[in-house]
Amino acid sequence: MTLSTTLLHPESRGRVTLASDYPFDDPVIDPNYLDEEADMERLVEGLKRTERSPMRVLWMGTAAGKSGRKRRSERR
């Protein structure tokens, strides 16, 4: 199981431009991630919600969510 935060509708806009007139040159790609402050604010809020998620609490209670090590008090 994976919990993640994704910004599906960012306000920031990137650009793709031609590097030259030669058609086989790779384009210049500027993704311009998180240029708008609102994008960063929404991602931070999403991360906070992920940390508070009931699914995260349930996952941490499973054997897969625990490290394999036992505490000293459990080693007997």
Image (cartoon, rainbow, N blue to C red):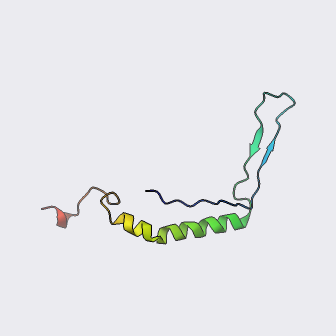
Q: Residue 10: image x %, image y %?
A: 70, 60
Q: Quadrant of the N terminus?
A: bottom left
What residue is drawn where x is 69% and y is 61%?
9
Pick the residue in front: 72 or 39. Answer: 39
Vertical side of 18 occupied by 76: above or below: below
Q: Is residue 5 left or right of residue 18?
A: left
Residue 42 position (above or below residue 31) = below
User: Which residue is depicted at the point 18% across and 67% down?
Assistant: 73
Q: Is residue 53 left or right of residue 11?
A: left
Q: Quadrant of the C terminus?
A: bottom left
Q: Quadrant of residue 8?
A: bottom right
Q: Which image quadrant for residue 57?
A: bottom left
Looking at the picture, tell me which residue is in the foreground, 75 or 61: 61
Looking at the rendered structure, the number of numbered marks drawn on it comes to: 0
Spot occupied by residue 32 in the image (x, y as percentages of width and height): 73, 53
Picture coordinates of residue 55 (x, y %)?
43, 67
Q: From this viewpoint, which residue is outermost toward the left?
A: 76
Q: Residue furthest right?
A: 21
Residue 13 sits in quarter:
bottom right
State left or right for residue 11 relative to residue 4: right
- Residue 66 in percent (x, y) is at 32, 60
